[in-house]
Each structure stands twice: as C-alpha cells, then as structure tokens.
Image (spheres, coloured by chain):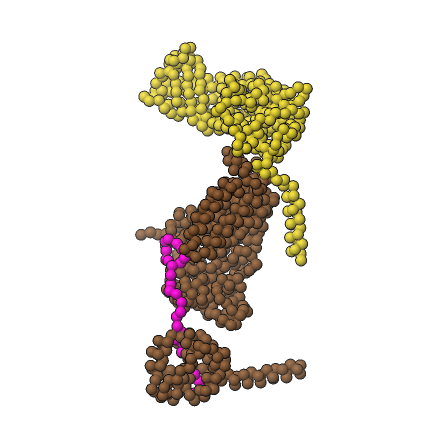
C-alpha cells in the first residue's frame, strides 16, 4: 500500500514537472540561425533575422525577416506576424550588432539573449561595420545561406586562432568581471559579395570606445591566451642590415610564422605605483623570410630572434598604450590586480580610474623552432 | 483431542490397507489385471510369456528397445526353469535392474522404460531398464552460433547432455543431482555444480526452489526458469538459457550452478548478471583485444537500440536546439513530406520492422528469404516515396534493429526490442525528460533485481573492481586468475597467478 502511494507521488511529480514540455516539431517551426540588430528611428530596434525555412520545392533554404520593435522580445512577436512558421531562436549561432547600435546597446541585447534558455551561450557576437541588415542581405551565388556562411567564417577563424573568440558567454563574463572589458570582432561587407573580418571593437564597460586592427588582435590573444597552432605575418623595419628585406620597396623585413606556441604570464610587480610585468614565451616555425640571412649560423639566428622579439614587444606595448588611452582593459590586467592584492575590493569604476596610469613592462621571448628553408 | 486420535488411527489403518494393496500379486492373472488397471488399460501394454519358464514380461512396447528385449532378456532365460527371481537376475545381462515387491514402484518403472519380469509364485518382480532412445542426434548450435570454438549443442536427451558435460569436465567433484519435477510428468531435472567451487549455500537455495515446485507437468527448461527466478514479474530474465555445452562448462568452472531438464535442449545457468547477457562464448575464444572491442560494441549497440529512435523523436518534437546545424536541412527536408508527428512516424516504422522480424521468424526457412526482399523494398524505398516516413528515420530504425540483433542472448535481444517502445512513447510525450525518466526507471529496476541472491548489476553495483577485468572489457587470461566474486566461489583461484605470468 505504501509502495503504491510512493509510486503515485513519483508519477504525479513526473507528470507535473514535465507538463510544461511544449512540442516544437521541427518542420512546424522557423529556425532563426542568425540575427542582426540595428538602431532604428526614435529608439526602435531594427531586427533582421535569417530564418532557415525548409520547403522542398523552394530554391533557397533561407528567408530574411525584417521587423522593428522597441525591445528584443518585441522583435520576435512582430516577426512572427510575417511568417508561416513559428519563429524560434534555439538554433541561433551568430548575433550581429550594427555599428551604431553596438556603441550603446550591446549589453542590453546580449543580456536579454543570454536570459533566454533556448539560446546557446556559445553563439558568436560580432559587430558589423555599417548596418547588420545590409550585411545579411548580401547576395552572392556562392553564398546561398548567409547565416551558415557567417557562422562558418567566424568559427573557422576562431579555431585557426586568427579571430579572438567572443561568444555571448565570454563577452558577458568579461563585462561583469571587475577588472576586464569586453571586445567583439568586427565584420564588414565588401562589394556586396564578401564578408571580411576587419578588426576588433574594444569596450569600456558597455560603451564601444575604439577598435584595433586584425594584426593587433594577434597580440591581444598573445597576451590574453595561449596559442597552440597560430600563424602570423610580421613586417618591420630591421635595424640590422643583414635582415633587410630584398623584395620590399622600403627594404622592410617580411617574415611569416607558423605553428605558433605561446604562453604568457602577467604579474603585478608594484601595488602602489601600479606596474605589471608581461612575459610572453613564444616559439614558432619560420616559413618565409624575404632577406637572404643565413639562419644556420647561430649568431645570425640569435640576431634574428632578438629582432623579432623586440618588434613584437613594441607592438604589444603599442596595443596596451592604445587600450590605456581608451581606458579599455581588454587584456584583464584588473583581474591580475584583483587576485594579487588581498581585499582590493576592486570595482569597475575604481579600476577605470587606476588603469590608464598603470605601467606595463613587456618582455617577449621568441624562439625559432625550425626555419623550414632549404639550404 | 479425541477426534484427532481417532482420525490418526484411521489414517494408520488406511495406510496399512494401502500397503497391503501395494504388494504385488504372486499370481500371474492377478498381476496382469492389477498392472493393466493401474495403467488405464493402455493399448501399448504388452504381456509376453516366456515359454516353458513361468515367467511373464510386462512392458510398454512404445518405451523399450525391442532388440535389447530379445537379445538380453528373452534369449537369456527361455527354456530354463527358475526357482527364485535371484536366479533370473543372475542370467540377465542388463545393466540397470533391481527387484521390488511394491506395485507403485513397478508402475513407475514401467513408465520409465523398464521391463517387468514376473515369475509365477515369486513375491518380488525384477524391473530392468532397456529404454529405447528416440530423439535426434547431436547437431550444431544454431541459435548461438559462433565461428571459433566447439560447434556442438545440447539435444533433448538428458543423459546425452550430461555425458557432454562429463566429457568436458572429467572432475570427480562434478556433482549431478537428480530431482523430479511435475506430479504427472515426473520430469528428471539435474542440478549440476562442481563441489568445492560452487557456493554450497547457493546450491541449497536452488535445490530448495526446484523441490518446492508444485506443478502438474514440466516440459521445458524455459518454463522451469520462470518458476525458479528471483523475480519472475520482471521483464529481465535473471537466469540464462543456453544450448552450448562449452559455455555451460566454462560457467561451471566459474562456480555457477546449472540446471538441466530432460527433454529440453537448453540448460539453465545461474547466478547471472545483466552484463553477462551481452557476452558471448566466443569472447573467450578470441584474443582479448578483439573480445574487448566486441563487448564494447555490444554495449554501444544496446544503447543505440533502446535509445536511438527515442532521441530522434525527442529532438524533433521538443529539442530542435540540439540538432547539429548541418543536419537541420536534410532532416527538415525529409520530414517536410511526412504527414505524421515524429512519434507516430517512429512507432509506425518500428512496428513495420517488428512485423517483418516476427514474420520472418515464423515462416518456414524456404519462404523466409522472400521476407528480406519484401522488407527491403517496402520499408527501404516505397515508404519514403509514398511520404510515409522520412529516410533518416529509416536509417535510425534499421540501425536500432540491427543493433538489437548483436545481443548474443536471444531472450535478452527480445527485451531490448520491447523496451524501445515505451521509451519512444515517453520521448514523444515528454522529450528528453521522458527518455531520462525511462532510463532511470529501467536502471532502478535493474538495481533491485537479483539472480539467486546476487546483485544483478554486479560488478558495477555493488562495485567489485576486481571483476571489472572481465565485464564490458576482457583483459588477457593472465590477469583473470580469480573466479568472479559474483558466484562467491569456495575456491577463489583458478590458478596461481604468479606462475601463470612466467613464460618459457
């Protein structure tokens, strides 16, 4: 008797708890795979959604739905009025923010999206130079599905360590962490047929304050993260005549590095007069160089490594100087400060007062693993 | 008190008179009458008088070997005169015989294939066993076939089966116990174990269970299993049936108990764990890497078979988020033509496959082949063309069916097939919650089962790390020197492990 009662309780709990499961049958819903937000008139948000709409007889698999509303959720409701299938965002992979909107309302939008349990926190965020709507309406015979194309583009570049990763979760984490500011990569439509990764937008709190180039984003990742198989091209004016490039008009040295392994270490060395040491260890394979230096000689190799290290140091310093001038701590020095100083009670505001005056010493230690050049 | 006493005296008197009835008559006519009366005047009773001796033979001609009767009995005693039955016994060259004065015993022996030798005037009769062997010859194992290893299978004769086991295990400790089950059939049931390895307590429990059976008849061991299982209400069998003598012998050596039923080609072995249903005898015969691979494959197939269709239904009905983006387009394209919701679609397809399988199993072998063609065409292409189902589901259902065939044990394979349906229904109504509910339900049920008192999910629950060496993986023989904890063997070591690792 008791057993039966327990069973009944379990069953009741089961039916009650799962009663909310609402059927969303695949072919009866419209799947939003990419969504773009733009600033509209009078505080409206213009939403452009790429809907994956499967009709066996239709030529394309996607449909662009454009709507306007005052809130993110409102967009969904008004978009539904235009479609034959209920729009759901569970397959959302890429969120695009128009340039204008990215300045002010990034946080509002990503916060709202993150609150929706159906939306993956691993969706990629991107800023669009110009309007997101414009980019999503790109017409090219080789890009039949712009949503999938964007997702693949971002994913491929993030995995190849060219683009710094900015998923919804990462951006919000960087925003909410005291002593760190978010950054979001920037995409641009070129000639109505291509999309290109053109830079990284950097934030102070939730305001877009500046941008760094794609080259600089390499150094951002170098300090921030580890490289496992990165690659880069370095063009610089060498002090040593041995390294001067032959092909370049200004005799600049052009080198190409591959299979980059790196790790970085940031240390707080002075708590009072804020001073950080950034040490980066980096080894890579040289795959191309435009000078005729003989790298089999150890003196030449040392020279080469020193020059490259110096150049990289300079670039990292430049990057940090730029970020400090914009008061945007995308590297996360504040976090280092926070866990190095006991009871620092760091707040975002406090950190933004301290950060621009911090001194940062950069040390890059570059080692060439293999030259890969035939002797 | 008083009544009791009278009752008991009555009883004693009755027994006395019964005893008197039970004494065989010395007179031939009366013996004949009594014999026929007790055996319902059956048409196959034969009464032969051996000329010139005063001896009469009573027997069922359907049960005995007539050649032996002539050669070993009639030839030996005809035209001689005997004074006592002991004289006759001296003349006969039959291996199994004895004498009795009890009519009950006479009747029992006659049914069991004995010939009754009655000497006029003697107060006892001889019963000699010359039973005929009707049955088929030993043949290959069909239901549990394997490539490497012995091919022979048990047949319906208990004595043949026992001789097969004796041949494999020439150990004086091999104990075969005879128990009779069934009031009417009095079927011979043998309880087999190796004394000194098998746990004596388990032997006692099993013997007790078999002895307590109160049935009119027992035809097959598969019925006996249902009677002596720990929980016969469970869908999972807790004792295994096998037709392979090599398997039985290897289990006996592990310390398991075996029950065989006369007339049944399948032996019962216990205690048995859930995992062992997914092990095949061949795992022992191939090298350990291959065996491990095959075992992992079968476990994977088990999950595939039970859950794959359900996951399809759940993700299409509720959780479109989990579908990989590359799969979205082909999935929705094939689904777009189907008029049913996913759960109906899946149930229809599973039903198709089950129909096909059941039809193929019931059909004569010659016609069975055409089933493959019908199934291939109807289910493979026509159903999709007709917009009846999506082609991705066909792949999933076919995979699930295929995976269920990899289960080496037929009865467990059936269960894997049946379990799919409730899980699909749960998935169709409650998505992944439903699947999880079903999974937990099955898991908890399995946790609660036992086989002859040992936990059904051993060695995982309760964890017996030493037994993991031979569970879903199989380590080399040098690693498995100990008998499994599951059987609680009285002799733990199979061999001395330190010696085994030395190689010449």
Residue A320 spot, x, y in % from top left:
54, 19
B441 versus A125 height, above or below: below
Image quadrant occupied by the C terminus of chain A: top left
Read off the magenta span: B122-151
Specify whether B317 is left or right of B363. Answer: right
Closer to us: B175 or B275: B275
Please say whether residue B442 is visible from this viewpoint: yes
The letter of the yellow chain is A
When asked about the image quadrant of residue B158, the answer is: bottom left
Closer to us: A301 or A141: A141
Examine the structure image and report whether residue B129 is included in the region drawn in magenta: yes
Residue A35 spot, x, y in % from top left:
58, 27
Closer to us: B258 or A205: B258
Q: Main secondary structure of the magenta part?
A: loop
B380 versus B9 height, above or below: above
Specify whether A127 is left or right of B122. Answer: right
Chain B display color: brown
Residue A61 spot, x, y in % from top left:
53, 30
When asked about the image quadrant of residue B230, the answer is: bottom right
Image quadrant occupied by the N terminus of chain A: bottom right
Examine the structure image and report whether residue A235 is included in the region drawn in magenta: no
Residue at (35% x, 22% y) in the render:
A373
Specify whether A218 is left or right of A169. Answer: left
Residue at (50% x, 21% y) in the render:
A194
Please say whether residue A170 is visible from this viewpoint: no
B493 versus A64 height, above or below: below
């Amino acid at each position: 008797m008791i057993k039966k009662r327990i069973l009944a309780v379990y069953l009741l709990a089961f039916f009650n708890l799962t009663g909310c499961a609402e059927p969303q049958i695949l072919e009866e819903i419209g799947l939003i795979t990419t969504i773009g937000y733009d600033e509209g008139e009078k505080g409206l948000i213009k939403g452009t959604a790429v809907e994956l709409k499967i009709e066996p007889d239709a030529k394309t698999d996607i449909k662009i739905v454009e709507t306007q509303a005052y809130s993110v959720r409102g967009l969904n409701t008004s978009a539904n009025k235009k479609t034959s299938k209920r729009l759901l965002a569970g397959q959302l992979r890429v969120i695009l923010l128009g340039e204008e909107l990215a300045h002010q309302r990034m946080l509002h939008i990503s916060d709202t999206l993150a609150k929706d349990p159906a939306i993956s926190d691993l969706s990629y965020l991107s800023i669009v130079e110009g309007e997101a709507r414009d980019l999503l309406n790109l017409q090219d015979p080789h890009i039949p599905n712009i949503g999938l194309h964007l997702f693949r583009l971002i994913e491929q570049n993030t995995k190849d360590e060219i683009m710094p990763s900015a998923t919804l979760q990462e951006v919000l984490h960087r925003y909410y962490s005291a002593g760190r500011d978010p950054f979001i990569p920037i995409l641009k439509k070129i000639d109505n047929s291509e999309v290109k990764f053109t830079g990284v937008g950097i934030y102070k709190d939730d305001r877009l304050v500046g941008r760094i180039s794609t080259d600089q984003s390499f150094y951002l990742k170098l300090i921030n993260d580890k490289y496992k198989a990165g690659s880069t091209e370095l063009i610089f004016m060498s002090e040593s005549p041995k390294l001067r490039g032959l092909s370049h008009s200004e005799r600049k040295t052009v080198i190409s590095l591959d299979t980059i392994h790196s790790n970085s270490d940031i240390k707080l060395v002075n708590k009072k007069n804020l001073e950080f040491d950034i040490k980066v260890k980096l080894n890579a394979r040289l795959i191309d160089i435009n000078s005729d230096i003989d790298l089999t000689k150890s003196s030449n190799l040392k020279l080469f490594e020193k020059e490259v290290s110096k150049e990289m140091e300079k670039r990292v310093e430049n990057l940090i100087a730029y970020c400090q001038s914009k008061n945007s701590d995308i590297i996360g020095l504040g976090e280092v400060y926070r866990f190095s100083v006991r009871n620092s009670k760091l707040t975002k505001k406090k950190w933004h007062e301290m950060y621009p005056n911090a001194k940062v010493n950069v040390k890059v230690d570059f080692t060439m693993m293999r030259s890969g050049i035939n002797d | 008190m008083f009544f009791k006493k009278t009752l008991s005296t009555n009883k004693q008197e009755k027994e006395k008179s019964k005893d008197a009835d039970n004494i065989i008559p010395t007179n031939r006519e009366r013996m004949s009458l009594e014999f026929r009366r007790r055996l319902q005047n059956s048409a196959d009773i034969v009464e032969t008088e051996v000329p010139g001796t005063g001896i009469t033979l009573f027997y069922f001609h359907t049960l005995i070997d007539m050649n032996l009767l002539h050669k070993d009995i009639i030839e030996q005693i005809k035209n001689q005169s005997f004074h006592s039955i002991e004289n006759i016994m001296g003349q006969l060259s039959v291996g199994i015989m004895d004498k009795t004065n009890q009519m009950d015993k006479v009747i029992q022996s006659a049914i069991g294939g004995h010939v009754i030798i009655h000497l006029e005037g003697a107060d006892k009769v001889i019963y000699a066993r010359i039973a005929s062997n009707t049955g088929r010859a030993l043949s290959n194992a069909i239901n549990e076939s394997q490539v490497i290893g012995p091919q022979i299978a048990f047949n319906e004769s208990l004595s043949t089966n026992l001789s097969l086991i004796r041949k494999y295990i020439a150990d004086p400790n091999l104990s075969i116990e005879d128990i009779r089950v069934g009031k009417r059939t009095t079927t011979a049931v043998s309880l087999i174990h190796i004394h000194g390895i098998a746990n004596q307590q388990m032997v006692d429990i099993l013997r007790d269970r078999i002895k307590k059976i109160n049935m009119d008849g027992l035809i097959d061991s598969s019925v006996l299993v249902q009677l002596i299982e720990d929980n016969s209400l469970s869908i999972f069998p807790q004792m295994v049936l096998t037709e392979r003598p090599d398997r039985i012998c290897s289990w006996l050596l592990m310390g398991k108990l075996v029950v065989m039923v006369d007339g049944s080609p399948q032996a019962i072995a216990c205690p048995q764990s859930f995992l062992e249903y997914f092990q095949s005898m061949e795992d022992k015969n191939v090298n350990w890497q291959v065996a491990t691979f095959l075992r992992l494959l079968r476990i994977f197939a088990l999950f595939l078979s039970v859950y794959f269709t359900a996951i399809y239904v759940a993700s299409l009905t509720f959780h479109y988020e989990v579908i990989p983006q590359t799969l979205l387009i082909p999935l929705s394209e094939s689904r777009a033509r189907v008029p049913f919701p996913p759960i109906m679609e899946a149930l229809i397809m599973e039903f198709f496959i089950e129909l096909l399988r059941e039809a193929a199993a019931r059909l004569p072998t010659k016609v069975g082949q055409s089933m493959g063609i019908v199934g291939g065409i109807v289910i493979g292409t026509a159903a999709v063309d007709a917009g009846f189902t999506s082609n991705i589901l066909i792949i999933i259902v076919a995979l699930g069916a295929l995976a269920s065939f990899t289960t080496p044990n037929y009865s467990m394979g059936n269960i894997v097939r049946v379990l799919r349906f409730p899980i699909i229904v749960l998935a169709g109504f409650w998505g992944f919650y439903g699947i999880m509910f079903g999974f937990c339900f099955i898991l908890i049920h399995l946790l609660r089962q036992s086989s002859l008192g040992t936990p059904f999910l051993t060695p995982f629950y309760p964890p017996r790390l030493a037994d993991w060496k031979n569970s879903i993986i199989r380590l080399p023989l040098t690693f498995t020197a100990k008998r499994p904890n599951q059987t609680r063997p009285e002799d733990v070591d199979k061999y001395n492990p330190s010696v085994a690792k030395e190689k010449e």
